[in-house]
Image: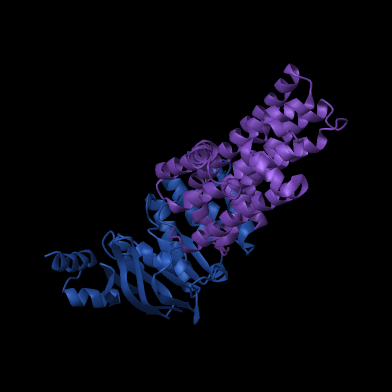
Chain colours: A purple, B blue
Amino acid sequence: MFKILNYSFFDLMRSRWSYVYFLFYLGLGFILFFLNNDITKAVITLLNIIIVLTPLIGTVFGVMYYYSSREFTELLLSQPIKRSTIFIGQYVGLSLSLALSLVLGLGIPFVLYGVFQSAAIWDFATLLLIGAYLTFIFVGLAYNIALSFNDKIKGFGFAILLWLFLAVIYDGLFLLAMVFFHDYPLDKFALSVTMFNPIDLSRILILLKLDISALLGYTGAVFQKFFGTALGSVLSLLVLTVWIIVPTYFMVLQARKKDF
Amino acid sequence: MINLTNLHKSYSKVHVLQGIDLFFDQNGIIAILGPNGSGKTTLIKSILGMVIPQKGDILLNESSILNEYKYRKDISYLPQIAHFPQNLKVEELIKMIKNIRQQKSNEIELIRLFNLSPYLDKKLGTLSGGTRQKVNIVLTFMFDSPLIILDEPTTGLDPVALISLKKILDEEKAKGKMILITTHIMNLVDEIADQVIFLLDGNIYFNGTVSQLKKQTNHSNLEHAIAEILKETYV
């Protein structure tokens, strides 16, 4: 598996898009500090960007990489390698290279501006961890979608729809449900709905860490009340891990049955 | 030895392989013929495990290959269309496949035979179709596998390369290997094939030697013999 992982990783690190992605975060980090020297505020601003952007980039790169490396995959399939090895190798290689762009791109300006001396070091670390988690989750989801559609355009369309749904529409529907059923106790419903959206879950996890109740929102507040800050954080991280494992499992299952 | 029993494969609505039973045990060159869409590539890809049949079993040296992968170290496969990663150099690709298979290889000799040295540091995306097919051939024949599967190996080759390919095929045959080959070039079949399998609509229409096929259709020319079979079935 490491040969495939290695190959995919270095293939991507050499590609132009990894640099663009890296430079984007690097620029973003420096601009944030240029405008505002407060690390905690920078972390909150970044939270809003990371929570939308890493899923989008993960989705787009995941689908793009699957379709553009299909020939290479076919070549590998005729070699004595297990199918699951090929796909997991590609998946991890791609996710790692994206996560690395994120961590280095944001890490460099933050280190230069003295994140190590600041109290916000753990908030910042949590933010990067969440970014990496979201990258793995959405690349996994994108790979699942790409594996189900031989047609590139269809695959792309569905992947973008999934991102749009989880990043934007989901919250809207959730809010609508809240307004409609406000006469009923909704705590447990809200909790379970949050579990099914990795983006919401990540947002809550960071806000719990930052301890900013004003930004928590309804689900966040319920979350905090129900589990408390410590248990809430552990639980949301656990559920996010499930969000990585389940798509990977389905990816392997799908790859095993597919014809090339 | 390859043994296919009652092999079925359909893609959504198209029933491509409709219960294929085949048994190869003698070494030599076996040509798989048939019109477009008769299931040749599907048959080959099932043996490689790239296509997963709905029903039936494939035995290679008495053990089933379904859900296996290690058996592929004994197979060299030349795909029909040479799709390679576009931004990889020829030498990088060769190195990578060698790294994956970890087997003895003789690519230097083959590179010389096909005059590929000037292309080694070129990216695969910039190569012409014929040159890419030569790279494809080098990748296939550089390992010493007992089973060789070639899907339309002649596509895009110039006459010189074609002669080289035939020479390689003769050498490999002399080493006692089993070579499966699909092609539409009947002259090639006439020249090299020891056994012919004719697929039609997902069934085996004919299985025997070239001379048997000619005798059965009363044609001395193989191309006409095949055309005769097709005409009968199209009417």
- The image shows residue B147 at horizontal and vertical percentages of 49, 70
Residue at image coords 75%, 21%? A33
- Of A235 and B24, the residue lying toward us: A235
Name the residue at the top extreme. A35
- The image shows residue A136 at horizontal and vertical percentages of 63, 47
**B9 lies above or below B116:** below
**A128 lies above or below A27:** below
Res A11 visible: no
**A15 lies above or below A194:** above
Residue at image coords 18%, 69%? B229
Quadrant of the snapshot with the C terminus of chain A: bottom left
Q: Is residue A93 left or right of residue A112?
A: left
Residue at image coords 62%, 59%? B100
- The image shows residue A250 at horizontal and vertical percentages of 54, 58
What is the total number of numbered labels drawn onto the structure image? Answer: 0
**A184 lies above or below A210:** below
- Of A173 and A84, the residue lying toward us: A173
Q: Quadrant of residue B199?
A: bottom left
- Of B96 and A176, the residue lying toward us: A176
Name the residue at the right extreme. A117
- The image shows residue B171 at horizontal and vertical percentages of 48, 68
Name the residue at the front extreme. A183
Q: Is residue A128 left or right of residue B24?
A: right
Quadrant of the snapshot with the N terminus of chain A: bottom right
- Of B129 and B204, the residue lying toward us: B204
Residue at image coords 75%, 40%? A126
Res A110 visible: yes
